[in-house]
Image: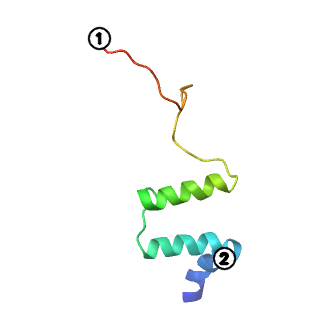
């Protein structure tokens, strides 16, 4: 009976061991993936790994350089 309840956990562990352990450890340490130290590390590794960043940043055609504004 106890084994039947844990079988989905073992199934996920067998299919995706690295992802499962990363999620398990972050849950144990109560890490929030949206907070700065973890978020900046994830952003750096995701963009360097060749994966597209699943970001919420919207450029709206703006350039990344300095822009000139006029204040009246």
Residue 65 image offset from top left, x and y in percent: 52, 30
Q: Residue at x 46, y 72 (%)?
A: 27
Front-lying residue, 70 or 9: 70
The residue sitting at the left extreme is: 72
Which callout, 2 or 1, points to the residue nearer the camera? 1
Quadrant in which residue 5 is drawn? bottom right
Q: Which mark is residue 72?
A: 1
Q: Quadrant of the N terminus?
A: bottom right
| Dot placed on the residue nearer the N-terminal end, 2 or 1 | 2
Q: CA distance from mark 2 to mark 1?
A: 64 Å
Q: Residue at x 55, y 54 (%)?
A: 43
Residue 33 image offset from top left, x and y in percent: 47, 60
Q: Secondary structure at mark 2?
A: helix
Circle 2 residues within 10 Å: few <14, some 14–19, many ≥20: few
Query: Is 66 located above or below residue 71 in the figure?
Result: below
Q: Which residue is mark 2?
A: 11
Front-lying residue, 45 or 6: 45
The answer to whether one can see residue 1 in this image is no
Query: Is 48 located above or below residue 16 in the figure?
Result: above
Query: Is 60 located above or below residue 71 in the figure?
Result: below
Instruction: Tell me if 38 is positioned left or right of 52 in this view.
Output: left
Instruction: Tell me if 10 is positioned left or right of 2 in this view.
Output: right
């Amino acid at each position: 009976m106890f084994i039947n309840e844990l079988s989905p956990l073992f199934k996920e562990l067998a299919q995706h061991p690295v992802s499962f352990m990363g999620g398990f450890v972050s849950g144990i340490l109560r890490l929030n993936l949206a907070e700065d130290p973890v978020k900046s590390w994830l952003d750096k590794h995701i963009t360097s790994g060749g994966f597209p960043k699943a970001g919420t940043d919207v450029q709206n055609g703006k350039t990344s350089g300095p822009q000139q504004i006029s204040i009246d």
